[in-house]
Structures are given as C-alpha cells and as structure tokens.
Amino acid sequence: MAQSKLNLQAISHVFKEHKAEPIFKLRRYAILALLTEKNGELCFVLNKRSPGVRQPGDICFPGGQHEMGESLEQTALRETEEELGIPQGEISVLGKSDYMLTIYRGVIQPFLGYVCYDVLRASFPNSEEVSQIFTVPIAFFMETPPEIHDMVWESVTLETFPYHLIEGGTEYPFSKCRVPELFYEYKGHTIWGFTAQVIQNIIDLLNQK
C-alpha cells in the first residue's frame, strides 16, 4: 500500500477484512488415540518407538505431520496405517479431543478411533518406527492419577545474539515457562509427555460428561 494513500479508512478496511493467523507459521500434526476392546474392556492402543527413530523408546499414539491435500483426520488415519499396519478402512473415527499448541510452533490435533481387537492382532507394525504395541485399559487411567512434575522451559540464545540492542543486555529478564509433566507407570511402561497429556485430557472430558 502506497504511503500517499494511507489513511484511517484504508487501515480500517485492511484490518476489518483480515482473517487472523498465527504470526509464526504453525506446523500441523494429527495423532490417533486408538481404542480397542480386549477381554470385554475398552483399552487404549499404545506403541513404543523403535531405537532408530527420534525420541526412541517413548510410548505414544500413532501420528505425524499433516501433508498437503489431506485433512487432519486423514493425516491421523494415514499415519496409523503406516506405523501400525492397520488398514484405514478398519478404523472407526469417534471424534476428537482438545488440541495442543507446542513451543516448537506446532499444533497437534488428537482424534479418537476404534479398531476391532482381531484386526489389531492381525496387523504388522512398521518395525523401523514401532518396536512394540500394547494395550492399557481406560479404567486404569480413570482410577490412577498421574504423578505430576514441573519442567521449566527458558530461552537459550546464541553467542551472536545482539544483547547490546536491548535494555539490560545479558541481564534482561527473559520469560520462563513452567510446564507440568504427567507420568503414568503401567506394567513396566512409563507413559509421559504429550501422550500422557492427551490421555489425561480424554479422561477429563469423559469425567465431565
């Protein structure tokens, strides 16, 4: 917009019609909190990450980054088939829980799905990504509160950061963020991090209803 044409009416027009977006572009992810019924009991289907992938050994739900041309629900289903070997057509999507904004400029949307246990048992997970699949009864999480331990996130700057341009320099009081981390222990498995947060949110929503 040319400065000569800039006036209050022009500014109002630009911002009245503007659809707000994040200033920093967010990467979108989707996961599938998969349920199955085992021995008459509804269970979460969880997997342990293989040693050769990022965050090896973590317990998680299947999921990954959104790709062009697909919905977030399609992302969750595609990633589940790629990781756990469960055909997308065998999964019933039940809905979605609350999403999370991460400090890494990402937004993660969990979906809930259901798969028949016989289909789950017959699936062949991708060994490059998944080392183990196991189930945990929903009742366990409803009856067992997680341990909560706070983690503090704080800014770490490079040596080239221009401290001399800000008041206070290296003594500037950069913000810190205290984040509660949840931990569940189940039969030798530690469930924590985002997976624990998603499970707790699902349990909270179930209890509210």
Image (cartoon, rainbow, N blue to C red):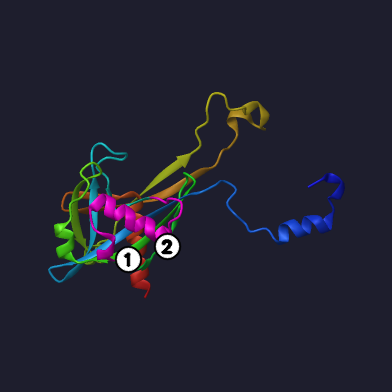
State yes or no: residue 86 in magenta: yes
Quadrant of the rendering where the C terminus is positioned: bottom left
Q: Identify which amino acid the numbered label 2 is placed on.
A: Asp
Residue 98: say if magenta.
no
What residue is shown with label 1? 203
Q: Which residue is mark 2?
A: 98
What's the residue type where badge 1 is placed? Ile
Residue 103: give x, y in percent of width and height: 47, 45
Q: Which stretch is magenta?
A: 65-91
Labels in figure, total? 2
121 to 152, vertically: above or below? below
Horizontal arrangement in the rendering, residue 190 relative to residue 202 (left or right)? left
| Quarter of image, res 152 | top left
Q: Is there CB contact under 8 Å for labels 2 and 1?
A: no
Q: Nearer the viewer, mark 2 or mark 1?
A: 2
Residue 74, position as x, y percentages in the image = 38, 59
Secondary structure of residue under mark 2: loop
Farthest residue toward the right? Answer: 4
In the image, which disc is placed on residue 160?
none
- Residues 73 and 194: in front is 73
- Residue ID at (59%, 54%): 21
